[in-house]
Amino acid sequence: TSWGTVREVQAVDSENSKNLVADGRRRLQILKDLVDPEHYYSKFSTGNSKTLDTTDEKKSEYIRSALLAFHAKHYRPENFTVVIAGPQPLETLQDWIASRFSRIEGKAFPSSTGTAENDGTTNNNMSNVESLVAKAAKDAPPYSFKEPTPKHNSPFEGSIKGSMPLLLSTKPLRSMRKLVLMFPMKSDRKIPDKSPSNFLSHLLGHEGKGSIFAALQTQGMISSLSSGTRTSGPDFKLFSVDLELTQEGEEHWEQVAETVFAYCRMLNKELDRESKNESKEMRRIWEEHGKLERIFFDQTSPGGTYSYAPNLSQRVNAYGTEECLSAGSMLNEDASTFPLDSVIETAKFLTPDNCLVERCSEKAWEEAEKNAESSSFGFEKKTEQWYDVEYIVAPVAVETTKSWSEDVPNGKSATDSTELKLPSENRYIPRSLDLCEELPEEARVPRIEKPIDPPTLLINNKAGRLYHRLDDRYALPKSSLTVLIRNAATIHKKTSDGKWDYDGKTGLKSTMLSVMFSQAMAQETYDADLAGLYWNLTLGPSGIKLNCYGFSDRVPDLTTTVLERFIAGDFLKDAYFVSTKDRLVRGLETFFSSRRADSLGLYYRDALLASKDGSINESLLQTEDIDMEALREHHRSIVENKEVFLDCLFTGNVSAMTAKKLFSDVDAAICSATESSPETRPSLSYVPATDLERRVMPQEDIELHFQSENPQEENGAVVFTYQSPFPSFRGKGLSHDLSLKSTSAVRLLCHMLREPLFDELRTKQQLGYIVSSYYERGFSARQPDEEMLDPSMVPVDFITISVLSRKLAPTDIATRIDEFLEQFRSSLHEIPESEIRDHADALSKKLLKPIQKLQTESNSHFGKIHRFAPECVSATEEGKSEPLPWKTDEDLAECIQSLSRAELMETWDQILGPASRARIVSCVYGNTFPLAAKSNGGGRGLISSFGLGSRSGKITNNFSKLVDYRQRMGVFNNQATTVSKRSYSSVVSSSRHFLGSSSSKLSSTIPMVGMGVIGVAGMVGWTMMRNQKAASSK
């Protein structure tokens, strides 16, 4: 329909508005603006309300007719690739597809020859819109594997090819210092197993000794490097080397690029030697690369069908049914199949005269803009038409180009070319892929449907606890290890009376230590990453947490290596310090100016509910004040702290003996560092946890109103958060039955709410591209002033609704959400009982769905150990898996099936009803509807139509007021609050708290360091480490 067309155009425009503040999208559009305008790659990626104009009925009907013509042309049975994945037998799946899809017939679409393509009838009257669709269909070459390889057709050929090397300067929204070298080259997607570009990406992106990364990181020039395809089409590829520069590297970016080109020249020389049979190093690397790819193909557990089916359909289209699963896995490759000629041909593209150089940073932009304003030769400022983003292009200086094109005498270059070498043999390739000898015969084949047995407590003594589970479901030679050294010194400071107090600056130091250590270990452990061994060490609120995952015969060695290196502290070097501090400072400086409105809405909410930190500016000042000596002292305070306790989970293809040996090695490292033994360590008292959720009282509506500081943000955002008054369900024996009922009802209501809310606010009202509702669970740790009999960790249930929109002001969006919730509440009375049962069945099945990945299983188990073991496990329970709440999902699924309509209505009124709700509304205002400067403090809410409770507060553009308000809020503990008919407190009148049967097992000699207050430094630091890990994944 015409209205349906207008509605979908609005959805496209909303999606595009979301992308306007994404640096990746902005930079991609600049690339499209640089290419030949006649090439299909120059087209706008998504579209908006200007390209799809529906401002009047005639234009709307034209767009609708184009959509219908496009559908008739392309949505035809012969173009379908249908993939269905599920647990049913193949015959059943095939019957389902055949019985449904065989009925589909293509609609008639006239061909340019005058005959319809599907029925043979003559039609010489192709309409203008049909001609447009038919012409557009020929712009890009066909993608299907059935089609021959198209002729090379680079979009850069007719635009900038003759001007290379060309310097492109861009200004990011987020703080970054990027240098990207991009090389147009031929597409090799038709030969995934012999791809020369993938092989060159492996070499250029390597981080081991002799690599580009190693040379430049050692000099303090870069913090990360990645290489591979920047963008591509059926008939071209743009290959890139992406470097994250330090401040030093930005000052000498030409020399950084020079090192990359020196490595490319070295590769060409090595390839030439290979062609003359003077070397076989390239063949060795190719064979090793293929060996690892084959191992990964053979030793992988299945993923979720939701993503598997669409990914496989794309691979069927690209590679056909015979190779769709194995393409790129190099199953038949060895040294004898090395594609030397094609690698030589592709490596010749890696030259300065075929390079587009992008500098993306504030400094790069300032330099380029200054040159452009002074009319310096060749500097030209342009504006991309769809995102309205500026960029500057200029030729690279002749002298610079010359230095990139030839070897520079030692002493005049950033890197001695003799330092650059091919990768050595990978010492982390698994020695054995055998399954553990202790595994019974029936467990040597995958059994994903088998219920998961909980881990066994092998060791429980003064040193710590070791949990172990021998995998009997995946039949893979892999294991997952999590080591948590509970240590309050990571994020607390000790007071004069011997107590530990949370300290934000200490947390910042821990963030810096974690990032520095990750950088320092990059070269040494890169081979492990290539061989499928992954590690991560963080210094969080709980202490030192080390995760290692991969092929089981290498995991223990990697674990002890990483831990010993951290304890030794040899990573505390000036180069890593300068790089890490610089990135953290820049991340804090651009925190508000680079984030989307909905992410800021969550930030302000969490700052009120779950943070102990001050403002971003306070964290910035604290970071700037940290020096190298302070970090050395902080490192010593962590590794020498004797008040530690070890929690360890080793699961997968690992024997109990190996697990005990690893536990002993870790404990020995701790003893050496602290110069103590478990027997001589001080008796540990309760350590204050930093996990925190503040209590929002019933009938309390808290409004947060802040203006976005992102200059490109057109959207506003509204985040509704409803807090349940009851503690969330922890497990049978740990929680009251009413907690089980409450959590089950909350989760079922969230499941029922999601689709109707999306359909009404996103599909029908078209408020914005992002409209979501979901269940959240927080954790609140026992605080120092609470009784020791209180549970150490109390979970909290939340219902959250989030909308990102530029259609209405946030206050009006909030009103629309309230109106919908009122209507939905009424519909709960009328919804058929069968529909409630369908939702309950679907949610129960989701909770009981077998876990398909070892790492997911391990994370789930360790989460319970982390939060509940200090409270639940006494010191005399070796060999047992209880009493930790291993089966909470099963308990919830059973309870969900038993919920009645009346119980759902009661829970709705308790949590979302205006008479009793505890709610936070976080509004962030974009440029379309800016925040009016009506108030800067408290008082009644701006959102007058909300039907506010008797207790309400408003905070407007004033973070200090937010901090003042949260100081008056209590901590969410194990008490319930209620104003409903059901008196929660009367049910437990015999006890002030909801203690389970295990409460008597709480041991005051076991430390409990909390997990939850991630803090400003944690958020920025986690992003830094995530980006660094992503850059390392080639």
Image (tube, helix red, strand yellow):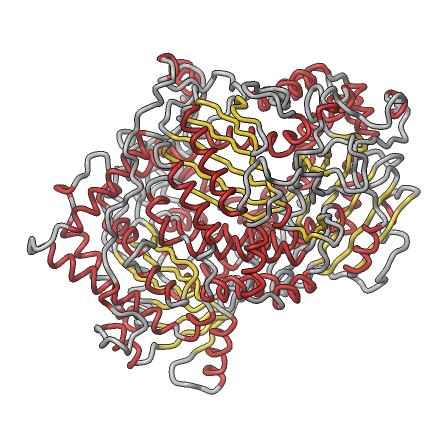
**428 is higher (above) or lower (below) than 495:** above
Q: Residue at x 86, y 37 (%)?
A: 698
Q: Residue 522: image x %, image y %?
A: 40, 53
- In-front residue for pair 820/722: 722
Q: Residue at x 71, y 24 (%)?
A: 1001
- In-front residue for pair 77/569: 569
Can residue 1 be seen? Answer: no
**563 is higher (above) or lower (below) than 1017:** above
Q: Is residue 597 left or right of residue 211?
A: right
Instruction: State the residue lying farthest toward the right.
Output: 950
- In-front residue for pair 227/341: 227
Q: Residue at x 60, y 45 (%)?
A: 642
**415 is higher (above) or lower (below) than 874:** below
Q: Quadrant of the N terminus?
A: top right
Tell me the quarter of the picture where residue 426 sits: top left
**38 is higher (above) or lower (below) than 424:** below
Tell me the quarter of the picture where residue 874 sits: top right
